Image (tube, rainbow, N blue to C red):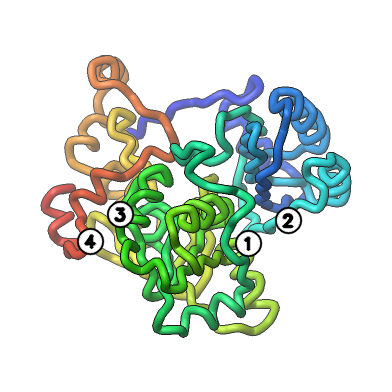
Amino acid sequence: MKNVTKKRTYGLTKEQAMAKLDAENFNRTTVSLYKYVKISDPQGMRERLFEIWERLGCLGRIYIAHEGINAQMSVPEHNWDQFVNELYAIPEFTNVPLKIGIHHDTSFYKLQVKVKKQIVADGLTMDDYDIENVGNHLTAREFNEAMTDTNTIVVDMRNHYESEIGHFDGAITPEVDTFREELPSVVQQLRGNEDKKVLLYCTGGIRCEKASAYLKHQGFKDVSQLHGGIIDYKHQIEREGLDNKFLGSNYVFDERGREQIGCQVISNCHQCGNTCDRHVNCQNLACNLLFLQCDTCESRMQMTCSKHCKRVVNMSVEKRKQYYKKHGGNTNRFSKSRRARDIRGQQSPWYTLKKIFM
């Protein structure tokens, strides 16, 4: 049987919160926003935003720091205008661009507004970049046109498990777990190409904002970024009837897991090799590996990554408690999948994986 951890949110378990969402008789809009702006009192801003968004019934994960805001949210449709009006009434966030999600399935089940040192963990100091000297912002049309130039290098500024299920054709997709790792890795890969046109893209644009400033500081002269990221790219190509150059799905850090951009699935189940673009976390909490698993393997393996982990989740409750006490437990929903990456390798066929996982 599966080991299900009951997480609590404001007196409710996760299961109760999800049931409450299911009972809602209104629709929600998934939206993301970010802005690099000086916030003198992050804690005070945190309290102000939490009061507004709790009153409006918003859910989501929001980070506030002295350098700005980074938010992914779910907003009740009937409160959307009020949400925008009250957000824009705050001087620091007036007219901040809002990236509307592609699919509006359940994305968040609680409201979290946290004060952080940085809105994106990048390991940089203020001497490593100038946030006022960022790359050119390109529309979807301009990005498509720029990719046709043979002198152009396209770089995915996301993690390997994100690009595995979707990326622009021909893009460099660094094999890294974190943005902190990716910045120096990309510079190393691009060395010698300082005079070439570099195109950056990410989910909603926030990582590219910092990355483009960092690359320019490192001597790259012609750096551009996809304005609004993959999320807005999807809306623009549909609105303007443009060709879709993005292959596969867009990974998102919420309960949806991914948003489909094109009609094709470019990735495979890590256990059987069948077409699959759905990430799951291994149900052995001491493992919690993030990996790709199809419906068939989920049923057969009980949402675990290996025979060993399957045995663990089928232990008695008492034995499982003892196991976690000895080996620890990682309940982070987004535990990184470095082990899957290291096993897989960039060119390894799926059957190599099968031998190790199974």
- The N terminus - image quarter: top left
- The Cα–Cα distance between marks 4 and 2, rounded to whole angstroms, is 36 Å
Pointer 1: residues within 10 angstroms few (<14), some, or many (20+)? Answer: many
Query: Which of the two residues, 134 or 305, is positioned nearer the viewer here?
Result: 134
Residue under label 1, please give it: 228
Pointer 4: residues within 10 angstroms few (<14), some, or many (20+)? Answer: few
Q: Inspect the image, locate mark 3, and give the three-letter code of the amino acid beneath it.
A: Glu
Q: In this view, does 61 lie above or below 256?
A: above
Residue under label 2, please give it: 97
Q: Is residue 341 above or below residue 41?
A: below
Pointer 2: residues within 10 angstroms few (<14), some, or many (20+)? Answer: few
- The Cα–Cα distance between marks 4 and 3, rounded to whole angstroms, is 8 Å
Secondary structure, mark 3, is: loop
Of mark 3 and mark 2, the one earlier in the sequence is 2
- The Cα–Cα distance between marks 2 and 1, rounded to whole angstroms, is 8 Å
Residue under label 3, please give it: 175
Q: Position of residue 258 (x, y in %)?
A: 50, 56
Of mark 1 and mark 4, the one earlier in the sequence is 1
Labelled pair 4, 2 in contact (Cβ < 8 Å) = no
Q: Where is residue 357 in the image (x, y as percent from the top left)?
A: 18, 47
Asked where in the image residue 12 lies, by quadrant, the reply is top right
**Numbered circle sitting on residue 346:** 4
Labelled pair 2, 1 in contact (Cβ < 8 Å) = yes
At x 37% / y 53%, what residue is drawn? 161
Q: Inspect the image, locate mark 4, and give the three-letter code of the amino acid beneath it.
A: Gln
- The Cα–Cα distance between marks 3 and 2, rounded to whole angstroms, is 30 Å
Q: Position of residue 2 (x, y in %)?
A: 35, 34
